[in-house]
Image (spheres, rainbow, N blue to C red):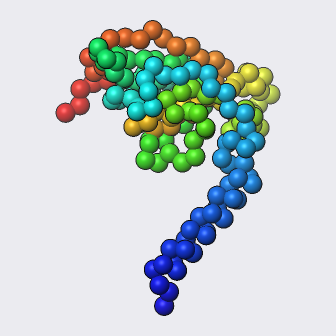
């Protein structure tokens, strides 16, 4: 029968091997990828004050997030134009995130996800997808959002929170 110490040491060795395998395959998103920090959110790495809201309409994706300033609560917004794909993982289930994406919007290139989407596209849509970029952002206390879109812009901040602005309903 193995001692708990021996089992613990074995588990640590296995974890180190897994980390090395990920690095060799480039799954850390840092070794073979260029990550460009594009926009820093107007709050510190302590995270969002509260909720986020993700809305997809007419080919665009809007991310709204609550944050606190010294004087009041505010809602910030990033709109991704001509979005063809997005995925979200809550904070607890976020796996590997792009370096520098905590409370900041980054661009990842080259993107394996974008390459995969290009392989699936028909000829008519191929050049539309080819113009897209892979963006990601980790909103601490909420989760990790990745978006494939052609561009983005920042909307003007609004006073209040998402419920006060009637962006999300009050759920009791």
* Front position in the image: 161 or 2: 2
Residue 114 placement, left or right of 155: right
Question: Is there any visible trace of residue 167 in the rendered image?
Answer: no
Answer above or below: position of 79 versus 1.
Answer: above
Front-lying residue, 47 or 93: 47
Residue 13 place in picture, x, y as percent: 61, 70
Q: Position of residue 143 (x, y in %)?
A: 46, 38
Instruction: Examine the rendering and report whether any part of residue 74 can be seen.
Output: yes
Percent from the top left, x then y, of residue 149? Answer: 63, 24
- Residue 118 lies in what quarter of the image? top right
Residue 40 is left or right of residue 172, and the answer is right
Q: Residue at x 29, y 15 (%)?
A: 72
Query: In the drawing, does residue 67 fall left or right of residue 124?
Result: left
Q: Residue at 57% across / 75% down in the picture?
A: 10
Residue at coordinates 41% horizontally, 11% vertically from top-left? 157
Foreground pick, 61 / 122: 61
Side (left or right) of 5 relative to 86:
left
Q: Is residue 66 above or below residue 20?
A: above
Note whether 22 is above or below 168 in the view shown. Answer: below
**Number of marks drawn:** 0
Outermost residue on the left side: it is: 172
Residue in the image at 53% along x and 22% along y = 40
Q: Which quadrant of the figure has residue 104? A: top right
Residue that protrudes farthest toward the bottom in the picture: 1
Where residue 52 appears, x then y in whole percent?
39, 28
Q: Quadrant of residue 147?
A: top right
Closer to us: 128 or 34: 34
Image quadrant occupied by the C terminus = top left
Q: Residue furthest right?
A: 123
């Amino acid at each position: 029968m193995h001692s708990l110490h021996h089992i613990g040491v074995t588990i640590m060795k296995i974890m180190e091997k897994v980390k090395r395998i990920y690095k060799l395959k480039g799954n850390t998103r840092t070794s073979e990828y260029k990550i460009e920090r594009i926009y820093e959110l107007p709050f510190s790495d302590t995270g969002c004050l509260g909720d986020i809201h993700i809305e997809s309409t007419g080919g665009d994706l809007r991310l709204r997030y609550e944050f606190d300033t010294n004087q009041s609560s505010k809602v910030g917004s990033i709109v991704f134009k001509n979005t063809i794909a997005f995925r979200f993982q809550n904070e607890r289930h976020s796996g590997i995130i792009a370096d520098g994406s905590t409370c900041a919007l980054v661009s990842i290139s080259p993107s394996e996800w974008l390459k995969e989407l290009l392989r699936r596209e028909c000829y008519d849509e191929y050049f539309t997808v080819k113009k897209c970029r892979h963006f990601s952002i980790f909103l601490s206390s909420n989760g990790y959002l990745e978006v494939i879109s052609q561009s983005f812009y920042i909307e003007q901040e609004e006073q209040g929170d998402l419920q006060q602005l009637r962006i999300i309903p009050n759920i009791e």
